[in-house]
Image (cartoon, helix red, strand yellow):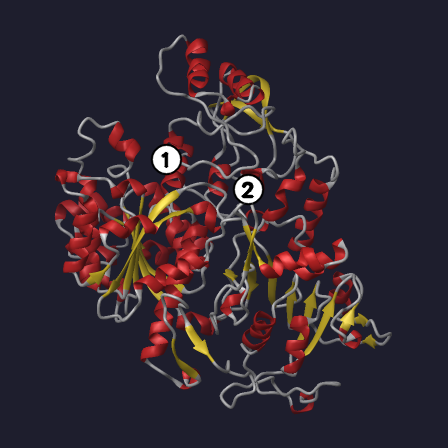
Amino acid sequence: MHMLKNETLKKLTFIDLFAGCGGLSEGFLLSGEFEGLAHVEWEIPMVDTLRKRLADRWGHNKEEAEKRVIHFDIQKTSELLNGKWKKNTLLQYGKTNHPETAKKGLKSLVGKRKVDLIIGGPPCQAYSIAGRAQDEDSMKNDYRNYLFESFIGVVNELEPKAFVFENVPGLLSAKPGDIPVTERIFDAFKKAGYQISEPKHLKKSVYSADEFGVPQKRRRIIIIGVREDSGINLEGLYSKIDSQRNLSEKLTVRDAIANLPKLKPRESKVRENGKNVSHRQISGKMIPFHVPRFHNSRDIEFFRTWIEDGMNRKSSEEKIAFYNNRMNKSSKHAKYRNLEWDKPSPTIVAHLYKDGLMFIHPDSKQARSITVREAALLQSFPEDYEFVGSNGAAYKMIGNAVPPLLAEKIALSVSESLKTKNSAVKKTADTALVSGIINEAQLPTLTVKKPMSVCSKNKTVKKLKILVACEESQAVTKELRRLGHDAYSCDLLPCSGGRPQWHFKCDVFKVIEKKGGKLENGKSLKSQKPWDMMIAHPPCTYLAVSGARWFYDPVTKKEPHPKYKDRRKKQKQAIDFFNRLWNVKDIPSIAIENPIGVMSSKLNPPDQIVQPFHFGDRARKTTCFWLKNLPPLEHTDVVGEGERVVFKSGKSQPKWYSDAFVKSKSDEERRTMRSKTFPGMARQMALQWAGKVNFTPDASSTKTENLDVKLAQ
């Protein structure tokens, strides 16, 4: 996210242990709420990848990235923290780290700052059920069972307010030394002065990534600990994470990778740059890391037959026989599996570095396993994320990573809890209006009676010229006008907000280019002043994951749907429109709103995801924001999620959403009702974004036409 410079001063700090290639760090950085002080990892391809990412995406120079990403074995905890590396340590890690790290250690990166949070996920092989099944003593004697002790050692030394510990659900049943590891972890953190959920309750801490906007079923346990003297409500923090789960709208393999260039088998293998190559890209732009591993003609035929015969839906016996009969083997396990277009991917695993037989691309004509880029997108890594090292190393680090989108949701929840507590403990002029802390287990945030006005004495703002694109309701436009800004809505539809003098009924790009144009009331806005900000609500019909089923024939499960044969073409047009809005060069500050959908992979994951109930409206409507030079919205009044309508099938919908079907008289009216911006959110968009630019107002710009600019109470 592109943050304003003064926003960085407010960020919380974290240290990432067992950082891998940076999935967990990426999510915390994407949240816009955190700054990473240090990232510790012991495998060099991952270290190089994370250093490159910090430099390419997060604004660090090469030297700073080298300092912040420490190539080291966390088991040498004292040397990691304090430096003064011993001779054998220097021989092993001296050449791959900044000299200052060896001398002064991780603490030199922290300096006088407070560490708010420590995050990390120790290697999961010792805890995973698959790993234990393949080991003769069920991994009971594997040293990785005890790496959590090194994690605790760093926590004990730096005393953060909280920590986030991620791992596989198999941790719940692991018993190294015949003692449940959950009991060992609980006792160790309790001794260190931290509260975590009791072992018997940890099952509630298992989450699936597909419930958080990741196109993949990936179950992980998230153990969160809070320092006992921090005053942070642990149950309330978990409630915040639970509130971000979306059980009905899930991204699929198609949403993540369908638009990548197709890679078709060659008639015969060729050698390029000393390597055998079995596939070629048919058309389109070359995408980094979108090159499949080599497959011989036998494998290509197997893959094609597997998909065309629908083997995924066959019995285990038939799947095993498919391999054994063709290879003259006697395996007891199925060797093949293809991804399915209209489902989330199965868990992306590190085993991909060995082969991709369980991750066959769903298109039988491509007859191949997935590429590094496809694996990364299914893990929710942004499209511009680059991996350093061999393809095998890239598959491994991606399979071991925490999905950045899942990490981002955790980051937002943790940030809200930490900031809520900080605000309650230290009331400043900006928090003087806070009435108190509500029960975090039920409503986990501060309740604000009166959000700070941009017209308050300690905040002055220049009148801004703001375009609200794709908004016929004028909900946000009117809130901006109430604050005294020159705001105009624009849509192909006539406005329904009752202010035609503020509405352009035409193509938004003409309005952007001309800095104005003919308004719906017949008058014209003629101005050479550029737009200061744009808030856009591009149509989501073909972008939202909730409409994905309309791409496919309900009987054959293949494209196209008999009633909507051009839907894929319209989706491409919608993606192009969204990207054009994002890439407008003449408007410095941009916010684009949309539901969960394909833009998470076609552009990048959203910078923030919010709900109407974060701003006083009792309703659930998952809303994503892509932000350029604007900060995330701060939650101001968290209330209940509102009434839901339960159907005979057991499924349910928010009542406001259901009402859109019942009360609307046409498809157009239904779309309008469902796309509305709730008033609390509209007001905070205006208050927080328009109020972020601090300038002395121009005396000649104090009038706002035809409007009482006094703020609503």
- Residue at 51% x, 80% y: name it: 451
Single out the residue that lies furthest toward the right.
522
Q: Label 1: how many residues lie within 10 Å, few (<14), some (14-19) or many (20+)?
A: some
Single out the residue that lies furthest toward the top.
328
Of residues 385 and 564, the one drawn nearer to the viewer in this rendering: 564
Task: Decide if residue 82 is on the left or right side of residue 288.
Answer: left
Picture coordinates of residue 282, whole percent (x, y): 64, 29
Q: CA distance from mark 2 to mark 1?
A: 19 Å
Picture coordinates of residue 47, whole percent (x, y): 34, 46
Please say if 695 is above or below 117: below
- Residue at 41% x, 35% y: name it: 395
Residue 340: quadrant of the picture: top right
> Earlier along the polypeptide chain: callout 2 or callout 1?
2
Picture coordinates of residue 672, whole percent (x, y): 71, 60
Mark 1 element type: helix
Mark 2 element type: helix
Of residues 175 and 388, the one drawn nearer to the viewer in this rendering: 175
Picture coordinates of residue 152, whole percent (x, y): 20, 55
Of residues 661 and 49, the one drawn nearer to the viewer in this rendering: 661
Looking at the rendered structure, the kind of residue marked 1 is Ala
Disc 1 designates what residue? 350
